[in-house]
């Protein structure tokens, strides 16, 4: 299980990526849309 899940809108992507980096540098594990979910994928299964 990851420590954080980051979901965001397109206009907030830069902020979300910054938050992702800061959390990972602090030693937390992070799931962020851009890296872990693909278009057309099964969001429910991917969340598990």
Image (cartoon, helix red, strand yellow):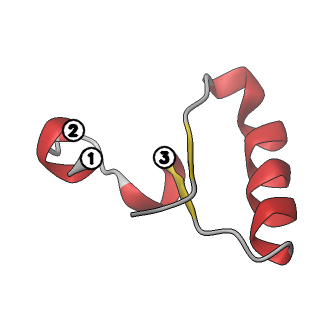
N-terminal-most mark, 2 or 3 = 3
Q: Is 41 located above or below residue 25 in the figure?
A: above
Task: Please report the residue visible at 76 percent of the width from the left and 77 percent of the height from the top.
Answer: 27
- Answer with left or right where residue 36 lies relative to residue 39: right
Q: Which mark is residue 47?
A: 1
Image coordinates for residue 23, horizontal then vertical, percent? 79, 61
Residue occupied by mark 2: 43
* Callout 2 touching callout 1 (CB < 8 Å): yes
Residue occupied by mark 3: 33
Nearer the camera: disc 1 or disc 3? 1
How much space separates mark 1 and mark 3, taking CA atoms?
A: 11 Å
- Answer with left or right where residue 46 lies relative to residue 27: left
Q: Residues within 10 Å of mark 2 (few under 14, many from 20)?
A: few
How much space separates mark 2 and mark 3, taking CA atoms?
A: 10 Å
Quadrant occupied by the N terminus: bottom left
Q: Is 5 located above or below residue 28 in the figure?
A: above
């Amino acid at each position: 299980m990851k420590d954080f899940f980051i979901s965001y809108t397109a206009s907030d992507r830069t902020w979300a990526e910054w938050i992702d980096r800061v959390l990972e540098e602090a030693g937390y594990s992070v799931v962020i849309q851009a890296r872990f979910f693909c278009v057309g994928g099964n969001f429910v299964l991917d969340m598990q």
